Amino acid sequence: MKNQKQFALSLLEFHGGQNSGLYAVGSCMLSDGERGVKYNPANHRGHAENAETCGALKNAIFELRGLKKYANFPECVKLSDEKRAEKLANRLEKLLAHQ
């Protein structure tokens, strides 16, 4: 659970507000971790990919990969931030593949 909580907090460092996929995934993952539950996208409406949901995981990956492109102040996004965001996106893609 400690790794899950740390992963969630890392995602939340990059979120763009309460309407972002990163906020949705990170906050639910953190909440699950606090309750001792392994994060499963299917347990949260809007996270898993199916006919009824929007795919918050895919949105979160998109947001991480477009960090500099969609930032309010792109000049403040460092190369190290982009590299961290890419690693987080890769971890989310693995999670998405195991749904």
Image: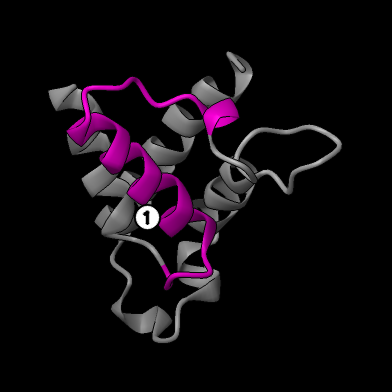
User: Most extreme residue toward the right, as rendered?
Assistant: 51
Total label count?
Answer: 1
Quadrant for the C terminus, please: top right
**Nearer-the-camera pick, 6 or 62:** 6
Quadrant for the N terminus, please: top left
Give the side of residue 73 with respect to residue 35, left or right: right
Quadrant hosting residue 36: top left
Could you tell me the amino acid type at mark 1? Glu
Give the residue drawn at x 30%, y 56%.
12
Can you give x and y, in whole percent of width and height, for residue 88 in the image? 38, 39
Q: Which residues are magenta?
A: 16-43
Q: Give the image's coloring scheme.
A: one colour
The residue pinned by badge 1 equals 82
Whether residue 17 is in magenta: the answer is: yes
Q: Residues within 10 Å of mark 1 (few under 14, many from 20)?
A: some
In the image, is residue 76 part of the stretch drawn in magenta? no
**Left-right relation of 23 to 2:** right
Residue 16: where, in percent of width, then height?
43, 71
The residue positioned 29% from the left and 79% from the top of the image is 76
Which residue is situated farthest in the top direction here?
A: 98
Q: Is residue 40 left or right of residue 37?
A: right
